[in-house]
């Protein structure tokens, strides 16, 4: 037959009434190129590159071998060369690739074949580059095309032939080059391709089992690493929280010294005066009662400070949420810092007689106390050296079943640069040695775990931090 006059349309029979396309007596299927690309991607994702390469090579082999057998039944070839050239011609007509032969050595009796050629417009190279955004592969990608050439030549010669791709557009080469030899002529360079073609179902099952086992081991290893990493993150988080708590305790110790020193001085001075009056026999009963009452009140104040310390200083990470009156918690906090504000002429504005302070809330009381103490401490540090007009205010409101607590100081606000970093761990605007940079990010984390929030309000004239807390919650904090 004259190959130049070959027309695949004369061989194919389209039978739309049966939903079939026949090539001779064999049924053919027409698929979209991008669908095959998707199939390749799915196989690669599930099985890996090696097994996908093997499957597509065997798929191509079956196509090439089958096409040869179908044409052999349909056409009479004038010579063997014509029959060989029909393979590349079919490749072209089927829209897979433009194939051209450049070399052929053939000895059927000696079972020897050595052929070379090249492909143009390989559908597999196009698919690969499109799927990988033009990034080149480190190995040939035209597996089904090489398999087709192997299958066609094996059917044509009657002995096993293997085609390998020596250059590939998918690897960045100008064109795809192939070389076809009888299986005995190949060395180690074709072992991978030969193994793929010879792999039977049992061997494939073993490979899949081995790969699945490897995946299972990898999965176990990843799970163990994720668990280990999660534990490490939890431990680090706990250490950060504890570091912040200890830092706050260090600052609190200094505050407590101020808070307790003055009451004790008052008690001591009162007792000394009473002792002198007793020694002089000039004790006045009414005056003594007043002085003892003053001592009792001052002692109660010291006791209140100590209770506040106990309520705030412990680690409450695992505490459940409890319901309490907001004013009680605020009193604990203010008992630890009120005296420091007074001694250093920083006005503390907080009217606890307002009804809103009697609001009942559900929270981790200790953690919420630590957040408020941290904010008041930061506000104090920001304005203590600013002069006589220094002040810090605590404003509380209830809106939409949420408690809104604003801590504002007389400072002029936070710079734009600091606003973007102020909640970052270890970032601090304080002098070296006066801040850890842990307070605000951990306070925000505590509020987040309460279903609330802690934010800086940059639009305010003075530096203002806003706590938002749901009034009722049933979950555990943290």
Image: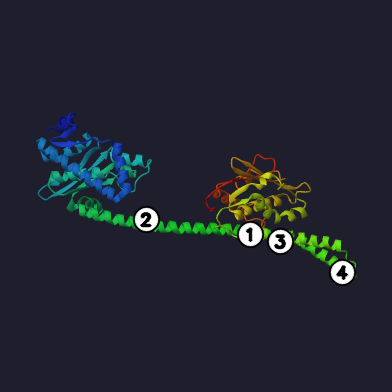
Q: Are marks 4 and 2 in contact (CB under 8 Å)?
A: no
Q: Which mark sits nearer the N-terminus, 2 or 3?
A: 2
Q: Are marks 1 and 4 in contact (CB under 8 Å)?
A: no
Q: Secondary structure at mark 3?
A: helix
Report the Cα–Cα distance between label 4 and label 2: 84 Å
Q: Quadrant of the N terminus?
A: top left
Q: Which residue is mark 1?
A: 313
The dot on residue 278 is 4
Residue 280: image location, x then y, percent: 90, 69
Q: Which mark sits nearer the N-terminus, 1 or 4?
A: 4
Residue 113: image location, x then y, percent: 16, 47
Mark nearer the viewer, 1 or 3? 3
Q: Is residue 476 above or below residue 32?
A: below
Tell me what residue is drawn at x 67 percent, y 58 percent.
308
Q: Which residue is mark 3?
A: 303
Towards the viewer: 60 or 46: 46
Q: Which mark sits nearer the N-terminus, 4 or 2?
A: 2
Residue 87: image location, x then y, percent: 18, 39
The dot on residue 130 is none
Q: Which residue is mark 2?
A: 219
Q: Which mark sits nearer the N-terminus, 1 or 2?
A: 2
Tell me what residue is drawn at x 13 percent, y 49 percent.
159
Report the Cα–Cα distance between label 4 and label 3: 28 Å
Q: Is residue 381 left or right of residue 45?
A: right
């Amino acid at each position: 037959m004259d190959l130049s006059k070959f027309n695949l349309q004369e061989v194919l029979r389209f039978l739309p009434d049966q939903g079939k396309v026949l090539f001779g007596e064999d049924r053919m299927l027409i698929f979209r190129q991008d669908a095959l690309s998707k199939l390749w991607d799915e196989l690669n994702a599930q099985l890996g590159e090696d097994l996908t390469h093997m499957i597509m090579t065997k798929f191509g082999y079956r196509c090439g071998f089958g096409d040869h057998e179908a044409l052999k039944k349909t056409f009479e070839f004038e010579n063997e060369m014509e029959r060989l050239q029909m393979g590349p011609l079919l490749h072209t007509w089927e829209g897979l690739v433009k194939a051209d032969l450049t070399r052929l050595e053939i000895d059927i009796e000696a079972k020897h074949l050595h052929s070379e050629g090249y492909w143009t417009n390989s559908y597999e190279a196009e698919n690969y580059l499109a799927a990988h955004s033009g990034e080149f592969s480190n190995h040939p990608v035209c597996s089904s095309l090489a398999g087709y050439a192997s299958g066609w030549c094996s059917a044509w010669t009657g002995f096993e032939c293997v085609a390998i791709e020596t250059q590939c557009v998918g690897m960045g080469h100008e064109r795809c080059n192939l070389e076809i030899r009888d299986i005995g002529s190949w060395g180690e360079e074709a072992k991978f391709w030969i193994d793929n073609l010879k792999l039977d179902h049992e061997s494939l099952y073993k490979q899949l089992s081995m790969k699945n086992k490897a995946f299972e081991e990898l999965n176990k290893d990843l799970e163990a690493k994720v668990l280990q990493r999660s534990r490490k993150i939890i431990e680090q988080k706990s250490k950060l929280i504890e570091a912040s708590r200890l830092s706050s305790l260090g600052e609190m110790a200094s505050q407590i010294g101020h808070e307790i020193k003055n009451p004790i001085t008052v008690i001591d001075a009162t007792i000394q005066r009473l002792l002198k009056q007793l020694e002089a026999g000039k004790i006045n009963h009414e005056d003594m009662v007043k002085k003892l009452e003053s001592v009792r009140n001052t002692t109660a104040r010291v006791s209140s400070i100590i209770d506040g310390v106990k309520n705030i200083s412990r680690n409450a990470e695992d505490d459940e949420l409890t319901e309490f009156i907001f004013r009680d918690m605020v009193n604990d906090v203010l008992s630890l810092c009120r005296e420091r504000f007074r001694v250093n002429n920083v006005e503390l504005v907080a009217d606890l007689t307002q009804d809103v302070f009697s609001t009942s809330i559900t929270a981790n009381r200790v953690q919420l106390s630590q957040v408020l103490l941290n904010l008041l401490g930061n506000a104090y540090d920001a304005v203590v050296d600013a002069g006589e007009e220094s002040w810090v205010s605590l404003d509380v409101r209830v809106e939409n079943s949420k408690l809104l607590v604003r801590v504002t100081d007389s400072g002029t606000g936070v710079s734009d640069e600091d606003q973007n970093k102020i909640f970052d761990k270890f970032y601090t605007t304080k002098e070296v040695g006066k801040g850890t940079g842990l307070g605000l990010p951990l306070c925000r984390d505590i509020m987040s775990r309460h279903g609330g929030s802690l934010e800086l309000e940059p639009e305010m004239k003075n530096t203002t931090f806003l706590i938002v807390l749901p009034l009722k919650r049933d979950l555990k904090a943290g």
